[in-house]
Amino acid sequence: MKIVHLVQHTHWDREWYFTENDSKAVLYYFMDDIFQRLEEDKTLGPFVLDGQTVVIEDYLSVAPHQETRLRQLIGQGRIVIGPWYTQSDFLVVGAESITRNLLLGHADCQCFGGTMPIGYVPDSFGQSAQLPMFLQQFAIDYAVIWRGWSEHNVAHSEFSWQAADGSKVTAAVLPWGYGCAKWLPDNPQTAQKTLEPILEKQARFSLTDHVLLPNGNDQSPFEYRVPAMLEQLNPQQDDYRFVRSSFSQFFQALESANVTLPVYQGEFLSPKYMRIHRGIFSTRIDIKQLNARLERTLSQHLEPLLAVNWRLGLPYPQHAVDNIWREAMKSHAHDSIGGCNSDRVNAMVKNRLESGLEMANQLIDLNMKMLAEGITAQQDGKKIIIFNAHPQMSAGLLELTIFTPEQDFRVVDSEGKECRWQIVEEGRQDMSIIVQELSNSTETTWYRKCCLLLEVANIPACGYQTLYLQEGINAGFEQQAKSINKLENAWLRLEVDEQGILTLTDKRSQQSYHNILQLVDGGDAGDNYNYSPPFDDWLINSNGFLTSISGTQGALQSALMLSWKIAVPQDLAARREQRADAVLDITMTITLADSNAWLDVAISVNNTVRDHRLQVLLPTAAQSHIHFADQPFGLIERQNLPSEMAVWQDEQWTEAPVALYPMQSQVMMYDAQRGLCTVTEGLREYQIPQNRQDVIAVTLLRSVGWLGQANMPYRPGRASGMVLPSPDSQIQGMRHFKLSVLAMNHGADNAFWRDVERARGNLHAWLATGWSRFRTNPHGRTFPPHFSVLSWDTELHFSVLKKAQHRDALVVRGWNPSAQPLQRGAPETHGEIMPATLAETALEAQPETVPTCAPATFVITF
């Protein structure tokens, strides 16, 4: 006899084809009904509130008077909450976002008196291989997941899931989803007929006689009659015994069965039984870029700046920062960050992210202003604060915009030594837009607006250095730019022919990469969930469509500017007829700094075309059947051609398991002689084309006009979501993309990883002009002209410097990007240093090395 564990729950989408306002209205009555049922019948419960505490936050925003009743039921264990703040999609959002999700979710649970100790992930569009690591860092030993699993990964639905760093959790799959037993009949005889096929499917892959039966669905009311009905059904049949249970009780029973669990290591991207929607990684790319920008601004700039200023005696606005994270995470649900929503909802998602950036940038501006105010000038001129978030002393190039009435100016350090710079863009600026006091003037004040590339050195770790802008003084070095037709420095050479075909040569290895950065446009017959090519696609590349090319060599870097007018079809109908009745205007600026071993690429596209996908190609010519991409706090190896592609149609999978993959910001393919890597800003998707297994195709954008559609080549059968038009997801207008390209002359060695970290950028500049939109009273503190909170001699990549969540201490975190263990080391500072988990608790074991795919966190108390 099989033991069936009834787990009652709801899956709560905050937004989808409906808005968060709609869901809050429904939530008011949903929760009132749950309270009534649980209070009337003390035998009911526990009820799982979808593993996300944002549901509580939303509910109390419309029913604050019900907080006492809610607390009582949570305290009794009859409503189960957490451990997450929101149900994120773990393949698209960043590592710090996942960490804060658990950190803030746990804080909410502690406030309300209980945390479900289960990594419950019921609806992420695929599962990250790093989930066991995140859970173990928060002392969570169990996971319940859906989507992405099949017996091609691991034979049973219960297994030991191991991350690359060795972390393990006991995992249980809901093979047919969280809604497989929704809306059960009240009558035992009728219910038995309904349950028989459900339970047969649920038990098909079970390792033991214990079977999960999740009873609930999207925003569905509490099925409070089901437990009593199942108890009536128990004596009427001999195959199953139904018990009122919870996920925790299920895992206890699984352990009591004393079976050896199979071990699985890796991600779950298999769409055999349920779609994982390959396409959300690039749907509505504007939202993806905006989210990546916000995540980076928070963890790589704002929080480190606030941490440094806090050590100097300025206040740390913890609640304000937490609120920015919370609002961002409200946009991280699978539908929200995936972009598979109605146009109205996506406008709200975008607004939350833009609002977060506004708040973050204002906090940065105010804190830079307060920092500059306290520094006693060592030279004449306006102060330039160079901020270094990373825990190593840094040098390099960074961008700085200045406004000046003078033709001449120079930048010097505290000792008067001149810094080199290069104007990369210049124009005129109406200063009444910048300076509030000039806004009421009857005359326009015009200044030069100069976007500079500034060369700096010896910027203190986790700290700052002060430079000075001296206007009206001629710079003491040659700045005259000259025209060029190729890029070249000590490491690389990039040449272009009259067709616009680019060839990159790595001078270190003498390996060449022909036709690099080629643009390819193809049709997209998919929807917001899935990319799907037309049945008869027509691919058009950029070769032969070049309209102009120019090049300049400056003091610090050189640049090539290319423009194309690519004749393409306007829509799918024109593509079917192979009628190029529209034009894609595309410009590409490729820069090569004298001091860098990589190319920086900026691409601008005027997207006036519908139902298409645009990619940029990196032909590696590497002899390899695998490649690597980054994932949260690590690296993952993937197949160029998934073996499941040979069987998906015969086995009637729900969608094609094509080599269309997510990344955080990096993908690379290499062999012993050659290889290429790209590091992107906000581009989350790449593909290994089935007919070109040595090429990395990075998706720039995809334009589609439907939330859901049926019968697509890559996703046959019913529509996903709702069949609703979504014209905004065609993302028309100007779109801008950035990426860096690194040639790999010695594979993924230490020098390569240092270049990857530098290519991501680690320095920020701020000019103290004396102009400000908002005035503040002087704080009266005095700060040194240069300052460092700590330094950390490590090859780990930087993740964050921040104030600890619940104490007056600092947290610094790095992570191992490579496939090999790296030395952990320890920060050098005046405080007490404690190795810690992501939860900011003491780390029990303190190994000398950091495994692959693992973070290293320290809490420092002063």
Image (spheres, rainbow, N blue to C red):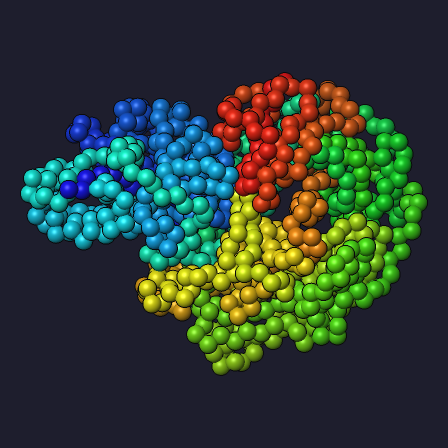
Q: Residue at x 67, y 76 (%)?
A: 544
Q: Residue at x 53, y 46 (%)?
A: 631
Q: Is residue 409 visible?
A: yes
Point out residue 161 in the picture as x, y percentages from the top left corner. 40, 42
Point out residue 13 in the picture as x, y percentages from the top left corner. 36, 45
Q: Nearer the viewer, residue 349 or 670?
A: 670
Q: Nearer the viewer, residue 25 or 200?
A: 200
* 722 up-or-down from 612: above or below: above
Q: Is residue 522 left or right of residue 272?
A: right
Q: Is residue 16 left or right of residue 414?
A: left
Total count of labels: 0
* 618 up-or-down from 790: above or below: below
Image quarter for residue 247? top left
Q: Residue at x 13, y 45 (%)?
A: 239
* 522 up-or-down from 390: above or below: below
Image quarter for residue 307? top right
Point out residue 378 in the picture as x, y percentages from the top left corner. 86, 28
Image quarter for residue 673? bottom right
Point out residue 25 in the picture as x, y percentages from the top left corner. 32, 41
Q: Quadrant of the N terminus?
A: top left
Q: Quadrant of the C terminus?
A: top right
Q: Residue at x 43, y 29 (%)?
A: 139
